[in-house]
Amino acid sequence: MVFATGFSGDYNRMLELADSLEKCGVFSELNANRWRGVAYNYLGQARTSEFYYQKAVNAKIVSKEDSLSYIKSARRLSELLVRRNEFGEAIKLATKTLDIVNNMNDDHKKDKAILLTTIATCELHTNDVMVAKDNFEKIYNIYQQIAKEDTTGRALFDAVNATSDIVRIFLSSGFIEDAKPWIERFEQFIVNISEYQNADQKFIDQQRADLLLYKATLYTDQDQPKDAAQAYQEFMKTNFGKTARGKIAANEYLMRTDQFVAAANNYAKLDEVLGEQGVMFNLDNIHDYIIPKMKANLEAGRRDSVVSLAKNLCVVLDSAIHRNQTDESAELAVIYGSEQKETEIAQQKAKIAESEANLSKQRLITLGVVITLLLVFFSLYAIKRRQHEQQLQQANTKLEDANLQLEEKNKHLAIAREKAEEASKMKTNFIMQISHEIRTPLNAVCGFSQVITMPGMEFGEEELAEINNGIVENTERITGLVNKMLELSDVASDSGIEKNDQVEAKDIVDEAIKKSGIEQATHLHFQSYIDNSLMGHTFASNLEQATRALSLLLDNAMKFTHPAEAAVKVAGGIEKMENASLQVMPNGENKVDFIVCDTGIGVPAEEAEHIFEEFVQLDDYYDGTGIGLTIARSIARRLGGDVVLDTTYLPGAKFVMTLPME
């Protein structure tokens, strides 16, 4: 099923299937990472693809299926290492994998041939030429054997591609004379595959065209210009040679033989070829196409064309560098998460330390405000905890001296000790969470402020608007955290909230959606529904407080349907659309239910009440303070209602806020 999805080109769906099948135990971790590597490779994210192939190679093999996935992953990873010229690591991995293949009972001839190709290529580049030639001979023998055993023509198709790659390896490495016997073998395989009744004629034509270019290159190196010219003329007669792609492919030979005018004429078709292939300029294809095109026009004496190309190159190169940096940064963020960004920010701070003098006073004031708020909060917390301890002491003085009462006292002391330890742990976790939650936006505000105040910096209106939005958003985030801490002081209060507003359910819903910003969340689909019987029906409540409680539930749905920080590191930042919904329904008891559902990580049934306690977070990898649900339930109860978790809902989490319709 995964293979078929990938074959259809839906690689994002391929990633979803790999995740789902691993989660339900159909795929092992190794097998799932193998398919993730395949999907990211075809999505053009080479770094992420290599990351998952490496995870597959490092995983433990526990089944026959794992062995096959290991071989495929290691095979592909070694090819990626060769592409980066990391020949030592590539040959080490390919050799280890070849040993595994040789020790398996099943026959994996094609895998052997591909691994040997990687090994031989590395040996050729590390000047171990004789050993490389021996391995190439083994590859040829393997493909001959496969071709004899196969009746479908598929093996010959693989043999044609493999021998063509080997010829190209010899030619590009400068071992042109050594390519001669392989050119002959390549030609023989083409003849063999042409004899099949249903052979792909377009494929055969292109292979013959490549063969003729290889011959022309060989003859040129052997100082046989007439034979080289004849081979090139025959190439021009092939269907592929008449296409724009064919003309571009021929330019390597033309420029090798100083036929720069012909090459320059062919390069006039370059934009057409790149447009057909959907190529966006990056540093690699600028090197492969634009630079040779400029050289051909320069050597052909077309100065005006060279000047035009140079101007265009400046624009294209700038865009390619920017795109290359953007793509590389995006992939690094998927793999390494935000920690790398924090390191870069720290380095930037060190470089501009001299310019921070004007901002130091503002930083100290901001830090003082934050510390003061934290001290106020923990003072309130300590007072409540001291009151609770005093109540326990008063209860202990009333215990009798009998053994039964002494045992009861010991039980109470044990419970108190556990609560104290839990409170200490919750306090520690809360300090860490609130420190992270405040530091992140605070760093952003400081960063923007530094940029604005740097000497000589000039900004356009759009840039200033973007900086202003960043400062406002992060300032509001800090304010929201402070408000949450202040709200927490009212959680234990039994006093009711005045209900002086006549509201409709729709008023609460609209305000909560707007306040939470859930409709703008890009990682999920959100829908809301209000029962028609509630439209136009008003009841007494407190619009601000009811909206606050519902917005906290919507915030919770947004947070736990978004990939966690740790999940980004492990799963590569997988783009996956989750779902969230808000339904408003009467419950038949003169009450109204606000039902928030999501497809996030969910809550185990045994934690249904625990999650409403202060500072509780079931998954430490998600950001947050662990007080949102506590505040939401407190507000709802003080309005005469409640907030509960529906444990029968399995796709994710389902919270129900009930308010009286007085």
Image: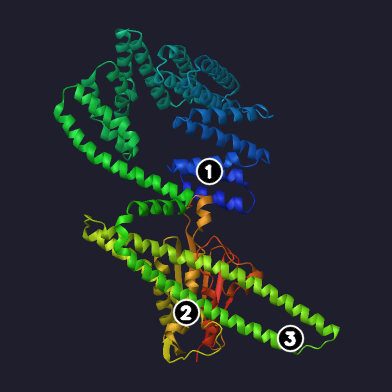
Q: CA distance from mark 3 to mark 2?
A: 33 Å
Residue in the foreground of this view, choosing between 553 and 416: 416
The answer to whether the residues at label 3 and label 2 have Cβ atoms under 8 Å apart is: no
Query: Which label sits on residue 396?
Result: 3
The answer to whether the residues at label 2 and label 1 have Cβ atoms under 8 Å apart is: no
Q: CA distance from mark 1 to mark 3?
A: 60 Å
Of circles 3 and 2, which is in front? 3
Residue in the foreground of this view, choosing between 22 and 425: 425
Residue in the foreground of this view, choosing between 236 and 572: 572
Specify the amino acid type for callout 2: Leu
Q: Position of residue 604 (x, y in %)?
A: 63, 67
Q: Position of residue 141 (x, y in %)?
A: 57, 17
Label 1, secondary structure: give it: helix
First in residue order: circle 2 vs circle 1: 1
Q: Position of residue 2 (x, y in %)?
A: 55, 45
First in residue order: circle 3 vs circle 2: 3
Residue drawn 51% across and 51% down? 569
Specify the amino acid type for callout 3: Asn
Tell me where residue 634 sits by quadrant: bottom right
Which residue was labeled with disc 1? 52
Which residue was labeled with disc 2? 486
* 620 with respect to 213 (left or right): right
Q: How is the image coloured?
A: rainbow
Q: Position of residue 22 (x, y in %)?
A: 60, 50
First in residue order: circle 1 vs circle 3: 1
Specify the amino acid type for callout 1: Tyr
Please say whether residue 608 is visible from this viewpoint. no
